[in-house]
Amino acid sequence: MYMILRYQNQTGRRVEAVLLATGSSTMRVVVKGQSDTSELIRVNGRWFTESGSALEIESMIPLPAGSSSLTTETSPRALAASRVSGTA
């Protein structure tokens, strides 16, 4: 899934991300421009980064089958990890 995340701080910065894995209260994502994956944690219905920054999931859009352009631009390590886990 392609995602747009918006931080809930004063800047309201938006970032592009790709969802790699999800659980009932966690998500593993790769954010465009970052060299490693990030874990998002849901607490009381709100999503937070590992460092505690609140964020909102503005959109989730299915990626076309076989599409990996955003992951390739973001991090070759993330692309390799997604191929191993079968999510790309």
Image (cartoon, rainbow, N blue to C red):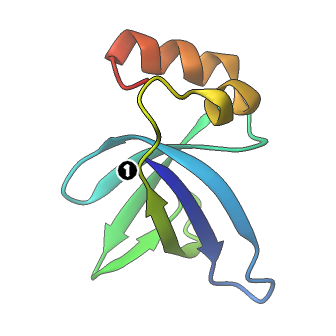
User: Taking 49 as reference, is 57 above or below it?
Assistant: below
Where residue 22 appears, as percent x and y from the top left, is: 29, 46
Residue occupying image coordinates x 38% and y 61% = 41
- Which residue: 33% across, 68% down? 42
Q: Quadrant of the C terminus?
A: top left
Helix, strand or loop at label 1? It is: strand
Judge from the rendering whether residue 80 lies leftward or rightward of residue 73; answer left or right.
Answer: left
Q: Position of residue 38 (x, y in %)?
A: 54, 44
Categorize mark 1 by other alpha carbons within 10 Å: few (<14), some (14-19), many (20+): some
Q: Closer to the camera, 6 or 25?
A: 6
Which residue position holds label 1? 27
Above or below for 58 versus 41: below
* Three-letter amino acid code of the residue under disc 1: Met
> How many numbered marks does the figure carry?
1
Above or below, comparing residue 13 to residue 32 in the picture:
below
Of residues 2 and 47, the one nearer the viewer is 2
Q: Quadrant of residue 69?
A: top right
